[in-house]
Image: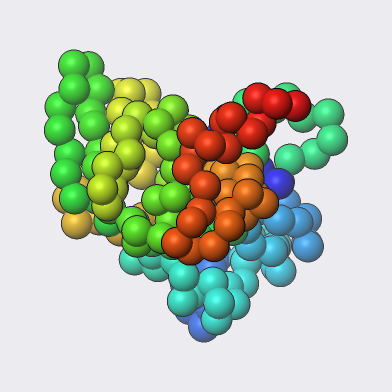
Amino acid sequence: MFTGLIREMAKVESFSNNILTLKANYKPKIGDSVAVNGACLTVIKISNNSFSVELSPESTSLLALENYKNEVHIEPAMQMGDRFEGHIVQGHIDCVGTINKIEKSGNSKDFYIEVPKKFLKYMIDKGSVAIDGVSLTINEVLDNSFRLTIIPHTIENTLFKTYKVGSRINIETDMFARYIYNMFKKDDKNSLSWGEVDKIMSRY
């Protein structure tokens, strides 16, 4: 379990044969879970100033692997008693999204991210989403994309400073949205709207 608050930017030393080796200030133990660009991976080796994690074929088929170079986001798994911020993130990537527009918005920037339509049902205005492991708030859900407003601090201290139109990114939708949708859906043609879910939840 993670929060979507990035611990640090780790340097990629190597990525070969599904083994990713990172140089970081963070010192994990063998077997620890670490989210790397939002994907929960297991530490399999530790060296003096680096550690290695292994990616399964399932992981490599789902992730935007082109971003596993130079620098990556890392976040260690939460421990009991940790301060909870961000939102609950599992480290299970749902899909890869593509940035299709970036616009200046006052002191910030709006990023428009296109995702496969089947994942939009888990997104609502002012809901949560994790982008390459970064916990963010959705400002607007559109027909085939959603809009995020990113403040300068986040841009300067994450991979957002490197993203361009056409960049692909790892997406994890909100865990609670997924569970609620699947609990209350009827079938593909008659699934509940979020408005109907709100009415049901208000009865309890």
Q: Residue furthest front?
A: 190
Where is residue 41, by image quadrant?
bottom right
Which residue is painted at 57% across and 37% down in the image? 197
Which residue is painted at 71% across and 69% down in the image? 44
Which residue is painted at 19% across and 56% down in the image? 166
Q: Position of residue 20 (x, y in %)?
A: 53, 68
Q: Nearer the viewer, residue 185 or 85?
A: 185
Q: Position of residue 36 (x, y in %)?
A: 54, 55
* 59 relative to 57, above or below: above
Q: Nearer the viewer, residue 100 or 197?
A: 197
Which residue is painted at 83% across and 29% down in the image? 81
Q: Nearer the viewer, residue 82 or 127?
A: 127
User: Quick check: can you spot residue 39?
Assistant: no
* 116 relative to 197, above or below: below
Q: Residue furthest top?
A: 106
Image side of residue 59 versus residue 106, left or right: right
Image side of residue 181 versus residue 124, left or right: right
